[in-house]
Amino acid sequence: MLLNIKVVSWSAGIFISISYLLCVIYGLIVPERLHGMKDFLEAVLPAFKWLTLGGFLLGLIESFLYGVYVGIVFVPVYNSINNKLGNKGE
């Protein structure tokens, strides 16, 4: 079975965006001394600034684009390997 690049890219983008939102919520709820969410997000998301509207929206967009990138890279690799090594009887 071959994967559809559009479906996987959108799914991964939405999944990573939801994960980003959960990280932000966690960072707002849990005391900062118990986590490093601010430092982590600022390290992995270029130009992200904690607790600013612009930073939040930029982080959400970047998270979605990271997920799309994963789909765009993963699907051709998976499909290529599946074509070579997959079960030909299906």
Image (tube, grey):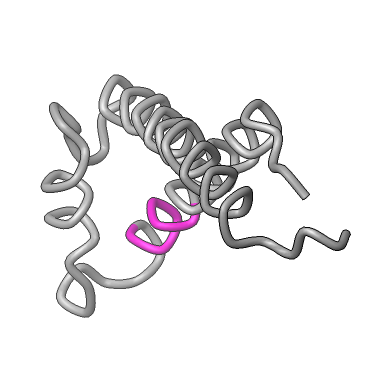
Residue at figure coordinates x 24%, y 60% from the top left: 37
Query: Is 69 situated above or below 21?
Result: above
- Give the magenta part as a residue range: 22-27
Q: Is residue 9 left or right of residue 43?
A: right
Q: Is residue 69 left or right of residue 82?
A: left
Frontmost residue, 33 versus 85: 85
Using the image, determine if residue 43 lies above or below residue 65.
below
**Where, by quadrant of the figure, is residue 2 drawn?**
top right
Could you tell me which quadrant the C terminus lies in? Answer: bottom right
Q: Total of numbered circles in the picture? A: 0
Q: 27 or 63, which lies in front?
A: 63
Residue at the far top in the pictured view: 54
Residue farthest bottom in this picture: 34
Q: Position of residue 68 (x, y in %)?
A: 48, 31
Q: Where is residue 86 in the image (x, y as percent from the top left)?
A: 66, 61
Q: In this view, does 54 lie to the left or right of 46?
A: right
Percent position (x, y) of residue 9?
57, 33
Residue drawn 21% across the image and 38% down it? 45
> At 69% across and 42% down in the image, what residue appears?
3
Q: Residue at x 59, y 44 (%)?
A: 79
Q: Position of residue 75 (x, y in %)?
A: 55, 40
Residue 49 location, quadrant = top left
Magenta: main secondary structure equals helix
Image position of 19 with respect to 42: above or below: below
Nearer to us in this view, 17 or 28? 17
Furthest-right residue in this view: 90
Query: Can residue 17 be found in the magenta stretch?
Result: no
Q: Along the horizontal axis of the image, is 55 left or right of 28?
A: left
